[in-house]
Amino acid sequence: MKKKEMIAMLLAGGQGSRLGVLTTTKAKPAVAFGGKYRIIDFPMSNCINSGVDTVGVLTQYEPLLLNSHIGIGIPWDLDRRSGGVTILAPHVKGEQGEWYSGTANAIYQNIDYIDNHNPEYVLILSGDHIYKMDYSQMLDFHKKEHCDATIAVREVPYDEASRFGIMNTRENDSVYEFEEKPKNPKSNLASMGIYIFTWKKLREALIADNKENPDSDFGKHIIPRMLGEGQTLFAYRFKDYWKDVGTVESYWVANMDLTWPLPQFNLYDDFWKIYTDADHQPPQYTGPNANVNASLLSEGCEVYGSVYNSVLGPGVYVAEGAVIRDSIIMGGCSVGNNSVIERGIIDENARIGSQVVIGCGENVPNEQKPSVYDTGITVIGERSVIPDNVSIGKNCVIYGISTPEEYPNNNLPSGSSIINEKEVIV
């Protein structure tokens, strides 16, 4: 096989538990974003726009939708004889199979795949970030500095630095120390989870580390190991838009960013297109009494009510008199007459009845999962059904077909949950 200068390994097996019911039946990278896209479309598009034409996608948790979405890579021009996109699920080796147990362990288990392409460099990516980056510029930096590893970093406010893996660097941006979520950070250069390694050096580190750490991780094990061995690591500064959409709040904020008159993150850039596997839909339609303001409407939407500062996926139906404000309504959903949704995330193919109010009341954290639902956003899971004439508070979560009997006095107080996992629209 012809030698590739650099191939990409895209880590897309995460469960994304902090996204709550949005990841009940799909991996985090498969969650819809920005109307018609899915989160994984962004690193995939970055690859092809950067000239990286060989991508291994490592899947594990609930991979069905993700596998179907990626297919053979046609939307990203990755359906190729040499290279292209390959789905890399955990598999049996010898007499036993083994789940991926860490970010570096996942790469270790696919050393044969990488060796088959014989690359000089390997690009490691996360499948759950929203950004545009030219990886070829990062590779040029890696080669110029003669690095063994290059880690993409962003400056974050010092008061937030303790939430990240922090790279401590010398004046020339060479890394002398990595600290995972330090209480008293020495710098504010946060790792973005984007790495370029010289493959020969990474291969050696993966094999050595696997003997000591079966849950081998890049941040916890590989980078400290390489630093300890005196290898050359540099921080590559990235200054453009980047969002880790790993929580309900960060996911909501990143979608709301798209509704600005001049959004920080431009989905309409002809020079850096974001590609996706989307069915062709009829154009949007807004009825004679509709009112749409500062919102993103995907193809196939029918809006007869009012939509403000919101993102609507393909084929969303908003009935007469309905009001949607500061919300994300994913593809295939319907919202009934005179319903009101504020700060809501409605997952794909859900049905909201008539005269429903979502997002009222006090901001009380969710009783069952206060760390997931605590910022006033109510989340309705995919293919769920909300009956007519009910009010639903803040930080609520509903999954499945709910009935009027589950709403005492037609009301679900803030912080409550209704989970009917076996009962969804098929």
Image: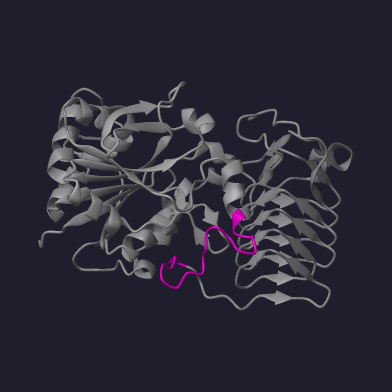
Residue 396 versus residue 291 in the image, above or below: above
Residue at image location 13% in from the left, 35% down from the top: 204
Magenta stretch contains residue 189: no
Give the dominant element type of the magenta stretch: helix, strand or loop.
loop
The answer to whether residue 367 is left or right of residue 361 is left
State the colouring used for the structure image.
Answer: one colour
Which quadrant does the C terminus fall into?
A: bottom right
- What is the residue that sits farthest to the front in this orientation? 171
Residue 175: x and y in percent read: 27, 34
Which sits in the foreground, 149 or 322?
A: 149
Q: Is residue 106 left or right of residue 409?
A: left
Q: Tell me if 412 is positioned left or right of 195 in this view.
A: right
**Is 113 rendered above or below residue 417?**
below
Q: Position of residue 363 (x, y in %)?
A: 76, 35
User: Can the viewer see residue 21 in this picture?
Assistant: no
Magenta residues, as a range?
Answer: 257-277
Indicate the position of residue 127 as horizontal and vertical percent values.
Answer: 40, 49
Rendered-image quadrant of the N terminus:
bottom left
The stretch drawn in magenta includes residue 273: yes
Asked where in the image residue 73 lies, by quadrant, the reply is: bottom left
In the displayed orientation, state which residue is furthest to the right.
409
Residue found 36% across the figure and 26% down from its top: 179
Location of residue 84 with respect to 340 vertically, above or below: below
Q: Position of residue 288 (x, y in %)?
A: 82, 78
In the image, 127 versus 309, the foreground residue is: 309
